[in-house]
Each structure stands twice: as structure tokens, then as C-alpha cells.
Image (spheres, rainbow, N blue to C red):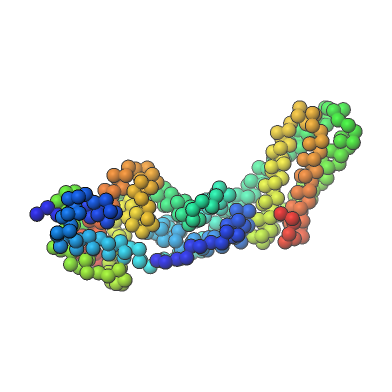
Amino acid sequence: MTISLAVPDILVARAKSGDLEALEALYRAFETPVYNLALRVLRRPEDAEDVLQETFLEVVRSIKQYRGEGHLWGWIRQIATSKALMRIRHDRVRETEQLHEESVVGAGGGAGAGDMAGVGVIGASAGMSPGSVPAQIDLERAFERLSETSRAVVWLHDVEGYTHEEIAEQMGKTVSFSKSQLARAHVRLRRMLDEGVSQ
Amino acid sequence: MMHCTMDDLLALRAGEGSAWARQHAAGCAACRAELEALYQRVAQLKALPARRPARDRWPAVRDGVLAERRRRRGRWGVSGLAAAAALAGLLVFRPFWTKPVDAAELARVKQQSATLEQQLQRYDPDGRVTSGRSAALAAALEDRIAVIDGELAQLGPSRAQARPADLVTLWQQRVELMEQLMTVHVTRAAYVGL
């Protein structure tokens, strides 16, 4: 997913003055990356759309506080991440989802010592190239079967480039929580891919 | 044989692997393959296609923004009336605190401000469709009027008594901004000097 996120300074200045056309231009520029981040974390399109809306309402309210330090996308992404994680915290079905995930991958998905990611049975996943469409579909399905928390950690760390420290701060957890969630998620992803995620 | 765990592999990927993990991975084809699989999984995640929302949420965002601005304007109206009432009280009960020329000018600009408020109310800008640019200009002007209302409220009767010229200046500025606001709403001029 490669999207140009460069925004002219004059557009930001107009948005800061409250110009609705400039604010809409910002919305159009960042609509897709915000929606994707929320969709990958929350999975349900309607939830992702709600986060998109909440994010931009917050952007409009707070844009005067944006000082131009760092890329605008980084600032907007921080708001979007916060909104998505807030929704996870308030999501009453997350425990149900966790049970669903456990039933899919089987018990014992830990990443402790000796629970090596199945050396010898990695053929299928190790042979995939990043551009392979069937492999992407399998990975996308497997990723969707992770719990919301696991998806959030994997997406924020591996795709958005957040550090474990940043994730821990955003989630109100410890760094070791973020690290262990990432390891457990990768063990589960690998197992699902090896076992055939569509089964 | 003990192999690398996923924690070890992730640490190796981050360049933070232990000496044991680095040494083991260097000599273990299976762990190297597992590390390569990890890299590929992450590359595939990054390469997932971008999805677009099915519905356009901008109209909802815009409506929310405009509703917030209307609410804010309502609050400012109340604070503006409070400031005006306080100052009217000051004039009634302390009519001799200043030079006649200040008192006359103050009464004039206050009357002008009240007239403009009434005109704006009759025009009902909230009930009319306006362009994004006009709405933004109106919001900026309302921001500045709110700042002046705040200063008027802070000035208060005791300080106003000591600084009558400041009071007149603030009311004059308020009238100027109200006139510009009327211009934006009524004629929808593209430029009002902001």
C-alpha cells in the first residue's frame, strides 16, 4: 500500500484557519490511510468508518495545535490509532473474538522457549513471495483471525513502524506486553498459514 | 536441538538478538528459513491492498464541525450579552466616570453593535447554506469577536472606570468585526481583509 501523503503547507495553514474546503482536502488526502489502519485493527468496515469520522472530527477540533513538527500524517495517525484502540477497549465482543481465535488456531499458541515456530513445516509460508496474490489472501485471512489486540500490535509495529515503547504507551500496557503479543501473533499467523487458513 | 523461538527471531529482525540466537541462526538452516519467512510475512502485510470506505464520511464530519461552530457561537452570544449588560449597568450607575466625549462615543458604538447583532439575528446565518470559504471566514471573525467579548468581560466595571478609552476602543473593534461578519454573511464577499 503506497500512498502519497505529502500535503502543501498552504493547505495546512488554510485548514488551521477553519477553511472547510481545506479541511475537506485534508480529509480526502488521509481518508484511505486512516480507514486502512482502522480496518486492519478493527476488521469491521462500519467500525473503521466510525473511527475515520471520529478521527477527522478530532483533527478539525485540534488542527490549530498542530505545530508542524513532524509529518502531518504522523500526527493524524496518532489520533486514528488512539480512536481505534479506544474502540477496542470499549468493544464488548472482544472476549468472544478471543475465544473464536483460540478455537481456530488451537490451544498453546505461546512463543516461549522451545516453542520454535515449527522448524521443518515452514515450506509453504517460507516459499511465498511478497507479491503473490494467493499468499496475500491467505495472510489477510489469517491476520483477520487474530484478536483485535494482536492485530493492533502487529499492524502498528510491523506496518506502521511504531516501536514497542510507543505501542505500550498508546495501549496503556508494558513494553513486554507489546513484545509478547507480537511474538504470539506471529506464531499464530505462521501456524494458520501452514495449516491452510481457509480450512 | 534447541531452536530459536519467535521472540528470538523478532529480536534478530530488530537487530537486538542475543549472542546465542545470532550464533545459532548463523549455523541453522531451519532457523534461517524461519527468519526469512518472518521477513516475507511482514513484507506481505505491508503490501496488502489499500481498502477504501464504502461510504463517504466527509458530509458527516462537515455537519459535525458546523454544528460545533453553531454551539460555540451560541455560547459567545451569551457571553457577549453578559458583557454588554455589565457595561450598560456601569453606564447607568456610574455616569460621571469619564469625559463626556468618551461616554457619548461609547454609547454610540454600543448602539451600533446592538443594531448589528439584531440585523445578524434577522438574517439567520445558521439557517442558510453557505460556501466553505464563507463559513471559515465567518468562524475566524467570530473567534475575534469572542476574544474582544472576553477582554470586555475581563475589563469589568472597576478597571473600565480607570481606562475608559480602552473600553471605547474595544467596542469600536467589536463593531468593525460585526460589520465584516455581516459583509461575509450578507454579501458573501470573498475577501474581508483577514
The foreground one among A6 and B183 is: A6
User: Which residue sits at x=86%, y=41%?
Assistant: B108
Q: Quadrant of the C terminus of chain A?
A: bottom left
User: Which residue sits at x=27%, y=51%?
Assistant: B16
Seen in the picture, residue A122 relative to B110 is either above or below; the reply is: below
Q: Is residue A145 left or right of residue A19?
A: left
Q: Is residue A87 visible?
A: no
**Quarter holding residue B167:** top right
Residue A72 is situated, as x and y percent measured from the top left of the image, at 50, 56
User: Which residue sits at x=69%, y=38%?
Assistant: B150
Residue B43 is situated, as x and y percent measured from the top left of the image, at 31, 64
Residue B186 is situated, as x and y percent measured from the top left of the image, at 76, 58
Question: From this viewpoint, which residue is outermost toward the left?
Answer: B1
**Quarter holding residue A10:** bottom right
Q: Is residue A140 left or right of residue B189?
A: left
Seen in the picture, residue A121 relative to B92 is either above or below; the reply is: below
Seen in the picture, residue A197 relative to B194 is either above or below; the reply is: below
Q: Quadrant of the N terminus of chain A?
A: bottom left
Q: Is residue A129 visible?
A: yes
The foreground one among B19 and A125 is: B19
Give the number of marks.
0
Q: Is residue B14 left or right of residue A19?
A: left
The foreground one among B107 and B176 is: B176
User: Which residue sits at x=69%, y=53%?
Assistant: B138
